[in-house]
């Protein structure tokens, strides 16, 4: 990673502060909490948009921390510095956007590196879905949990009492 990092639009810090203060909660969530999906940042790391920062997403998140899941951008507004081609090639898997615009689509769909990046993004998304609650044993064998049955019983008793 670079020796300085831009945290907010006008705040700079060194890599040590970035790792020990700003990234520590995320590291704990990934390593100890086994997070399967993360949201990348809207701001910059040095002079690079965080959602397209190879050092942050591939070197630290996927490399050092061993993260295997899905990575989504923070709100994607395509205001000149957000670029889907850069984003997907540098470890981000999808753009969080509310409406279609020219910059939130991958423009280069024929080069080998672009196709590999899109395949990797699809793999990360599918890994996250398959390892989610949707495929857990509870989802396969649906039924009410004990706390749900208790809540329904309390509702019925209170309804009859009223």
Image (cartoon, rainbow, N blue to C red):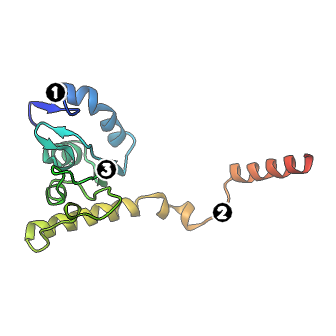
Q: Are marks 2 and 3 in contact (CB under 8 Å)?
A: no
Instruction: Name the residue tied to disc 3.
Output: 75
Q: Nearer the viewer, mark 2 or mark 1?
A: 1
Residue at the right extreme, as displayed:
161
- Image quarter of the N terminus: top left
Q: Within the image, what quadrant is residue 15 found in? A: top left
Where is residue 49 drawn, in percent x and y?
17, 45
Instruction: Give the camera-side residue of 70 and 72.
Output: 72
Task: Give above or below for 62 relative to 32.
Answer: below
Q: Within the image, what quadrant is residue 143 found in? A: bottom right
Q: CA distance from mark 2 to mark 1?
A: 51 Å
Task: Give above or below for 116 relative to 153.
Answer: below
Q: CA distance from mark 1 to mark 3?
A: 22 Å
Residue 152's tag is none
Answer with left or right where residue 146 lies relative to residue 85: right
Which numbered disc flags the more N-terminal residue, 2 or 1?
Answer: 1
Which numbered disc flags the more N-terminal residue, 2 or 3?
Answer: 3
Where is residue 83 drawn, in percent x and y?
16, 56
Instruction: Name the residue tied to disc 1.
Output: 12
Residue 143's tag is 2
- Mark 1: few/some/many CA within 10 Å (<14, 14-19, 20+): some
Question: Looking at the image, which residue is at 90% across and 51% down?
Answer: 160
Where is residue 36 drawn, in percent x and y?
36, 52
Tag count in the figure? 3
Q: SS for tag 3? A: loop
């Amino acid at each position: 990673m670079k020796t300085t990092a831009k945290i907010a639009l006008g705040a700079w810090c060194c890599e040590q502060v970035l790792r020990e203060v700003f990234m520590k909660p995320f590291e704990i969530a990934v390593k100890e909490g086994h997070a399967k999906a993360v949201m990348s940042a809207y701001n910059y790391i040095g002079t690079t948009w965080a959602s397209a920062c190879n050092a942050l997403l591939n070197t630290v998140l996927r490399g050092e921390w061993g993260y295997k899941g899905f990575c989504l951008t923070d709100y994607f507004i395509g205001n000149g510095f957000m670029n889907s081609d850069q984003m997907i090639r540098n470890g981000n898997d999808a753009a969080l956007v509310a409406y279609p615009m020219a910059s939130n689509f991958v423009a280069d769909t024929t080069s080998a590196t672009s196709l590999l990046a899109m395949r990797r993004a699809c793999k990360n998304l599918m890994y996250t879905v398959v390892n989610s609650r949707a495929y857990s044993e509870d989802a396969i064998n649906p039924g009410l949990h004990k706390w749900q049955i208790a809540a329904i019983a309390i509702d019925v008793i209170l309804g009859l009492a009223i």
